[in-house]
Amino acid sequence: MEHLIDKFEEIGFSKNEAKVYMTLLKESAINGYEISKKSGVPRSMVYGVIAKLVAKEVITELRTDPPTYIPLPVKELMEKRRRQSEETLDFLGKELQSIEKPVEVNVVKHIEEREQIINAMQKLMIHANEEIWLSAWEEELEDLRKTALEQCNKGIAMYSLLFTNKEESFGKTFYHRQETASIEEQRMGQRLTIVIQDDQEVLIAGFIEGQIPHAIQTSDPMLVLLAKEYIRHDMMMKVVSEKLGNDVVQKYYWELW
């Protein structure tokens, strides 16, 4: 009996409601006093329980004197509860979806091998709709040049910081010539190359001679912002260097550390 009562509780019945209903299944058309006696539900509580079951249309009150009660047949009860459950779930599903905010999961993808990294950079540039930010070294420009030029010709805004002595034209371009490029590579221990697509996604790669290059690619807005500000800061430093002289800027830089 107890295991049946536990199952009734799982579908929204109280223990006393389950006891009353099962009592009426065994012997219907009995009054409240008899229900209390046969179910074990105290008389002080049984009429309140009966009233709740009548309201739920689980039992029906007969106009006798005193009133007697009959249960809803088991098959009908199960069908009714199943239908109510489905209707409730359908309603909740629609209402909750209307207020649900999609969870944004910004996965950080790790990429190895030069060919895979270059391909990923090219794809980012190809899928740009508005702008591209690029910080690249001469060694990688050989593989990125064609895609960069094609996007510029399509009218995609491009902001480039290039570590090369060659004259390239990828949108608004700033240069680290050989003398400053070598200092940067020595300071960072690698050729840090960055591609940002539409403020939406960034790829950051590190190329080290003699080692397998590694990169991360993500749409995490904070990492996109940090990468863009890194490039923007480097561009600003190039402008300052041209105004004040590279020796002066380098002097102040190393005094900080």
Image (cartoon, helix red, strand yellow):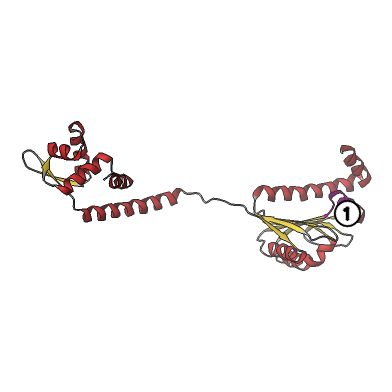
Q: Residue at x 29, y 46 (%)?
A: 8
Q: Is residue 232 left or right of residue 49?
A: right
- What secondary structure do most residues of the magenta stretch adopt? helix
- What is the x, y in percent for residue 62? 10, 44
Q: Residue at x 79, y 67 (%)?
A: 143
Chain part drawn in magenta: 182-190
Determine if the magenta segment contains residue 187. Answer: yes
In this rendering, does residue 54 appear at all? yes
Residue 174 screen position, x and y as percent: 83, 54
Residue 195 in view here: no
In the rendering, at what x and y percent does residue 108 appear?
66, 54
Compared with 217, 58 (above or below) is above
Residue ID at (94%, 45%):
247
Residue type for callout 1: Ala
Q: Which residue is mark 1?
A: 181
Q: Quadrant of the N terminus?
A: top left
Q: Residue furthest right?
A: 247
